Image (spheres, rainbow, N blue to C red):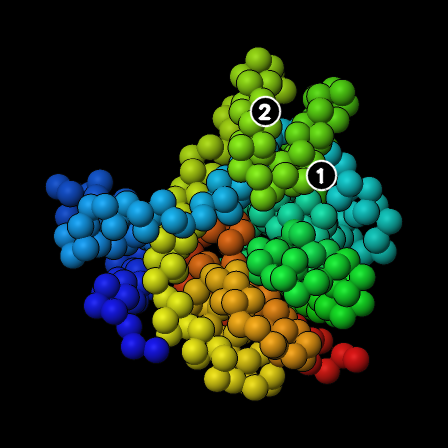
Amino acid sequence: MSPTTIQTVATVIFALALIHTFSTKFFEKLAHSRPRHAGIWHLLAEVEIVFGFWAMVLAVTMAFMLGKTQAVEYIDGRNFTEPMFVFAIMVVAGSKPILQFAVMVVQSIVKVLPVPRSMAFYFTCLSIVPLLGSFITEPAAMTLAALMMRDTIFAKASRNLQYATLGALFVNISIGGTLTPFAAPPVLMVASKWGLDITYMLTMIGWKAAVAVFITSSALTFLYGRELRRMSYSSVSPYSGVPMVMVGFHLLMLLGIVVFAHHTPIFMSIFLLFMGVATAYPQFQEKRLILREGLLVGFFLGGLVVLGGMQQWWLQPLLMSMDETAIYFGATALTAITDNAALTYLGSLVEGLTPEFKYALLTGAVTGGGLTIIANAPNPAGASILKGAFRGGVINPLGLLVGALPPTLVAIVCFRFLA
């Protein structure tokens, strides 16, 4: 497929955005070495800003090349439901009543596991919570796991444990949402078109993902057992004091947002109701809601939607030129440089695909979902919450890649070799 001039320009801008995501530490250093313009350098060092910033560059470029009308029509033609949903679900899932309920569930599991409490807590957050993403959605599971582990694990962990845990969390969230057809973005993109019901997801994909999640979580728990045992674990929850009636109401709002995830006016109305309740009863919330983090993540994903819409000219022919084995490993690799939901969406546009090809594309897309921050929609949410625990407040992309490789290999083995 021969690209148009604007498609070529958009691909160059997309490549610059990818380079930018790996260069945030450079901009952080500029902020310290050139304090006169520290504000702009700090801004460009925020990984959540990257794709939104370069999407604005693309929009301005389109306006100059094609005219304002066509540029506006292109932006209007993009579907921003997912960025808005991730923003809404992230803020609600990060509210004190939801966290109080989540910690209660985690603590009840921790009590029955036959290992030291700190190790049991680590294992539960790294395995059970990601699998819950199949029911409460992956962004909600990512938000809960990140908030529960931020001060208890990441803030106390060594650098090696930090990146090993982050990589495993991202991979487990990506594959842990495949027990159902409605919780993982790459599955949602094709579920209706390919007829993927809950029976198919559980029997063909979900149980293999669960095996991979438990293998990875168990291995890390015992590999870093000595360090984890030294961490203090308190059964006293930092999230308490919210009446169960208020907890139940927040759970209903969370459920409503999940159920109407594809209907922006409805789930945003529920979110606005949540904001009203949170404002009316501030005593049942933390000092602040995670609105800033949610908005930054929404900006990031919105930018990815704008930039990704111009990449079909090279992505789709590349995907369609592969056989089932090649498409699995190709999708796993391509997911690292583009959102995995975009890959499955492009596959859904092609008619006459075999069941084996569909399985390979879908499982490959979720397998690679932890390799980079942009590989899976919930990753920016987790990075936004956890980056303060890392050295200099920056998550090193190479460190994430190295940490994610072992759990990615575990997922490959489970998806490719389990019958």
Identify the secondary structure beneath mark 2: helix
Query: Which residue carries the number 2 mark?
Result: 274
> Which of the marked residues, 2 or 1, is nearer the chain's N terminus?
1
Q: Is residue 82 left or right of residue 355?
A: left
Residue 370, position as x, y percentages in the image: 54, 64
Vertical placement of residue 37 versus 377, above or below: above
Q: Is residue 40 left or right of residue 352?
A: left
Residue at 60%, 15% (x, y): give it: 281
Residue 262, position as x, y percentages in the image: 58, 44
Instruction: Pick whichever, 24 or 179, lies toward us.
Output: 179
| Residue at 77 percent of width and 58 percent of height | 198
Which circle marks residue 102 in the picture? 1
Q: Nearer the viewer, residue 71 or 121?
A: 71
Quarter containing the C terminus: bottom right
Pick out the residue farthest to the top.
280
Q: Gap in Å between the C-alphas at discs 2 and 1?
A: 18 Å
Label 1 CA crowd tier, 10 Å (few <14, some 14–19, many 20+): some
Q: Is residue 406 among what the camera can see?
A: no
Q: Amino acid at mark 2?
A: Phe
State the image coordinates of residue 306 (x, y, percent, origin top left).
36, 53
User: Disc 1 marks which amino acid?
Assistant: Ala
Number of numbered discs on residues? 2
Q: Are marks 2 and 1 in contact (CB under 8 Å)?
A: no
**35, 1: nearer the viewer:** 1
The answer to which of 20 and 136 lies nearer the viewer is 136
Q: Tell me what residue is drawn at x 37 percent, y 74 percent.
A: 314
Label 2 or label 1, whichever lies nearer to me, is 2
